[in-house]
Amino acid sequence: MNDNPVILAFCCHYCAYAAADLAGSMRLQYPANVRVLKLPCTGKVEVNYILAAFERGADGVFIAGCLEGGCHYLEGNLRARRRVERAKKILQEIGLEPERLEMYNLSSAEGPRFAQIATEMTERIAALPPSPLRPDRATVEKNVQEMAAAAQAAVAGDNR
Ligand code: FES
């Protein structure tokens, strides 16, 4: 059990991030454990980016991109799904539960679905022990801030 997991959500600016925003506007509650990082496209998420999130203390990670066929960069979300599958295999090889990682597709209009995904991921990760890689809470918070800043820089440069 992990009562207070740290979960990072790498969200595409065009869909999942907008859906998270919509969830907020609709005053839908979802767990504060989920930290939303905005990216220009999920195609930006490399395998080593996912692994770095775990290395820096995330207990769980999900990637949320546009619906299949709806990526603004054509195949970014398909690449992201393949990378998530690869990263899951690596997690297993190093002894971390692959269910700590998931890929979702949704549209910008799906605020309630975003809230549901965030809740489901939180429940899933809370049922697992804390990540053995997790440093102390202050370090995790600092790392999350750094990753958010890096994601923000990527959005600003849109250098998917
Ligand atoms: Fe949304 Fe590519 S633009 S996943």
Image (tube, rainbow, N blue to C red):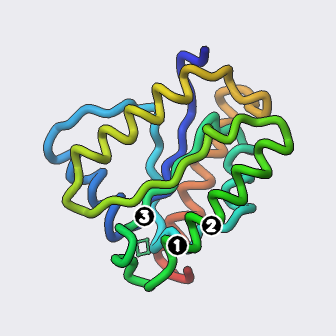
User: Quick one: SS at disc 2?
Assistant: helix
Q: Residue at x 65, y 27 (%)?
A: 137
What residue is shown with label 1? 78
Discs 2, 1 touching: Cβ within 8 Å: yes
Residue 71 in percent (x, y) is at: 39, 77
- Residue type highlighted by circle 1: Leu
The alpha-carbon separation of the residues under discs 2 and 1 comes to 6 Å
Residue 16 at least partly seen: yes
Which sits earlier in the primary sequence, circle 1 or circle 3? Answer: 3
Asked which quadrant contains residue 64, the reply is: bottom left
Badge nearest the viewer, 1 or 3: 1
Q: Residue at x 72, y 26 (%)?
A: 136
The alpha-carbon separation of the residues under discs 1 and 3 comes to 9 Å
- Residue type highlighted by circle 3: Gly
Q: Nearer the viewer, residue 47 or 56?
A: 47
User: Quick one: SS at disc 1?
Assistant: helix
Q: Is mark 3 within 8 Å of ligand 1?
A: yes
What residue is shown with label 3? 65
Residue 115 in percent (x, y) is at: 30, 40
What residue is shown with label 2? 82
Which sits earlier in the primary sequence, circle 2 or circle 3? Answer: 3
Give the number of the disc on residue 154.
none
Mark 3 neighbour class, 10 Å CA radius: few under 14, some 14 to 19, many 20 or more: many
